[in-house]
Image: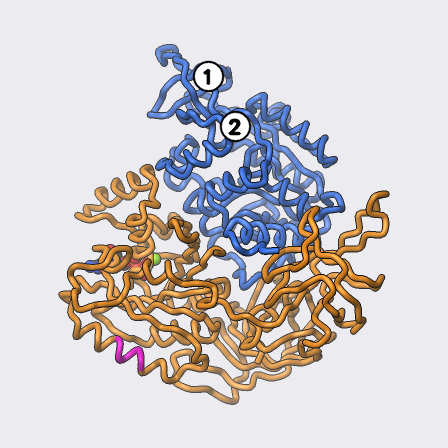
Chain colours: A blue, B orange
Amino acid sequence: MNKDTSHINSLENEAIYIIREVAAQFERPVLLFSGGKDSITLVRLAVKAFYPAKVPFPLMHIDTGHNFPETIEFRDRLVEELGLELIVRNVQDSIDEGKVKEETGRYASRNQLQTTTLLDAIEEFKFDACIGGARRDEEKARAKERIFSVRDDFGQWDEKNQRPELFDMLNGQIDLGQNVRVFPISNWTELDVWSYIEEEDIEIPSIYFAHKRKVFLRDGMIWSAEDEVVYRDDHEEVIEELVRFRTVGDMSCTAAVLSEATTISKVVEEIRESTISERGARIDDKRSEAAMEKRKQQGYF
Amino acid sequence: MEVLKIATAGSVDDGKSTLIGRILYDTKSLTTDKLEAIEKTSKQRGYDYLDFSLATDGLVAEREQGITIDVAHIYFSTKKKSYIIADTPGHVEYTRNMVTGASTSQASIILIDARKGVIEQTNRHFFINNLLRIKDIVVAINKMDLVDYSEEVYNKIKADFEALMSKRDYQDQKITFIPVSALKGDNVVHKSEEMPWYKGEALLEHLEQLNKADIYNVGTPRFPVQYVIRPKTDEFHDFRGYAGKVYGGNLSVGDEVMVLPSKTRSKIKDIYFYNEKYETASRRSSVTITLEDDINVSRGDMIVKENDLPTIDKQFTANVCWMDATTLTPGTKYVVQHGVNKVLAKVDRINHKIHPDYSGIEKDVTELKVNDIASVTFKLNKPIFYDQFKNHRTNGSFILIDSQSNNTVGAGFIQ
Ligand SMILES: Nc1nc2c(ncn2[C@@H]2O[C@H](COP(=O)(O)OP(=O)(O)O)[C@@H](O)[C@H]2O)c(=O)[nH]1
Ligand SMILES: [Mg+2]
């Protein structure tokens, strides 16, 4: 076996090692599943890590209620096919319970509200490790993130006081009430993820491929006009374009890009040539340069 | 080619962040939105050039103070290779970051400010790169634009650095000197027109031509068992697989092996990677191994070739880099994490402290403070199976965990 010839394979080996460390070092791990390509990739890696046994931890989806309908269908089918356990917790419930307040206005999104629902779910299930699909290349504050990132009782990230990580050794020792966020694909780039999806022939939701959609333009970005959760002013004109999405987070803050890529290999080709970074299409990071760092300190995933 | 991981070392303001930003810019790895953000901020600050350090300094405090606080990982790729560069802060108190960055790197860039030359900090940076046995080092003499691209300045710094090299422990380390200007882009990605006297390669050219043999030390295979896979399904009723990563060398089906610590002998039956079987598991692959015999193996055990055993002992001496604000004193207990294996350890004695600026050793030391490097002897409650660090980077290293705070408080390299 020449598993070390391509760099994608070496990233895969590293991720599988990390996922196995989670299963070995923690009592109640969970894989945070957003329905996006990164978490779909994580599921694939987890399946590979434990074959022929089942993945020894559940998936959890913190549902903003603002999903593209395709992603929910996709999620349920994936879980069914792989025989995985799925937990869903809803941001809507946190709103109904009065724990968080819905944002209003042009840039209203439920992205920030997820944090409360997530922290409550961690407490409810006593999860001690949450596996996530964040990558260091996504954003500057992420670039400082550890693979095992310790969060305190309030889920907060203390960026100035992180544990050093040496060689392959991952220190998962924590106190009661603390938990660890684990990022097995830390060292992958967006292109790596897409190349892996291509190489492994992993199925992903259709919105990642070019399709006709009613959209409108704002701040130089393309927004879906087909879904009512995306706020649109009356004067913002609706047009039809061929688009795809590069991330599929909360619909209300995920912009589309013009694309003709209808297959995975064409998507890989487009990404390779693209000059707009993935997070350039997420309005919540544009709010301020330090947006991500702030959200992480508050316990955001 | 695997991903090439590169560590950087240099004092504050030597230009590490600028150098990395320059590499990203010249390899067209900066996306338009990132470039726009850099242009905007540079202008706001009234610079008449682009401040590329903005590409890597990501935390608010870092941008405010114009310094790098924590190791950042930067990604880019060329047609030949994928790279990860660790932007390591250069403050004296951050030796731990440098050791950390170097531990996962295969090559290293040491920056020197051409106006300052080799300073005490440079000794330290070189010492750590040598301690960690990084095989390929580039000494980038930066800010050449501020010394009129002078060959004499370059030669003087090179000679001073070569004097240091005679003191090093690990001789099998390739060192390349390159005069650069990170700010202006000379000899970073493109060859400089300002320094016709320099006949060598630009920095990126050098990195591009590194191959595996240049950067990896090949040792003997070690297979620490990470996780035991027992599906308990009808199809795989008796399946008992040992999941782990192969280190140092390859393992093959049919290899006569020994399981430590029980010293039970067996043979490798199958090697799985997911649902496919392979004849050989190459180093650094995460595989699942089954054995011919039904023996009891658990996490922390190690599968090795029968004719190539590591040292099995309840004590060892190591060079320790202490990384915590608490002090290490003889008699104190820590958890030693050696790969995936954890044992309880007691500090038996501090043999001597090593000055990382090559000014010698210090005996009769009673405690270690943060960033100290020292030879320490430990006694363990159970034997571990180790190699000397000089023979095996993975199986010769460990971390120390404080069982009160759970923090990683030190790293060690077994002698
Ligand atoms: N003239 C000149 N200035 C440089 C060069 N490289 C870096 N600088 C400047 O030196 C300062 C410190 O650079 P920075 O990259 O933040 O250093 P770091 O602390 O090592 O990351 C900044 O003002 C840079 O613009 C160079 O090659 N020439
Ligand atoms: Mg810096």
Residue A275 lies, with reference to residue A70, above or below; the image says below
Query: In screen coordinates, is B310 left or right of B201?
Result: right
Picture quadrant of residue B130: bottom left
How many numbered markers are drawn? 2
The residues tagged by marks 1 and 2 sit, at their Cα atoms, a distance apart of 17 Å
Query: In screen coordinates, is A93 left or right of B6?
Result: right
Magenta part mainly helix, strand or loop?
A: helix
- Number of residues whose C-alpha sits closer than 10 Å to that of mark 1, classed few (under 14), some (14–19) or many (20 or more): some
The residue wearing badge 1 is A213
Point out residue A83 in the picture as x, y percentages from the top left corner.
74, 35
Furthest toward the left, the residue is B148
Check if residue B159 falls in the magenta segment. yes
Seen from the viewer's position, the closer of residues B397 and B357 is B397
Seen from the viewer's position, the closer of residues B65 and A130 is A130
Name the amino acid type tagged 1.
Answer: Arg
Seen from the viewer's position, the closer of residues B216 and B280 is B280
Q: Point out the stretch of residues depicted in magenta.
A: B158-162
**Quadrant of the image for the N terminus of chain A?**
bottom right
Point out residue B93 in the picture as x, y percentages from the top left corner.
42, 68
User: Where ligand 2 lies, by quadrant?
Assistant: bottom left
The residue wearing badge 2 is A250
Picture quadrant of residue B108: bottom left
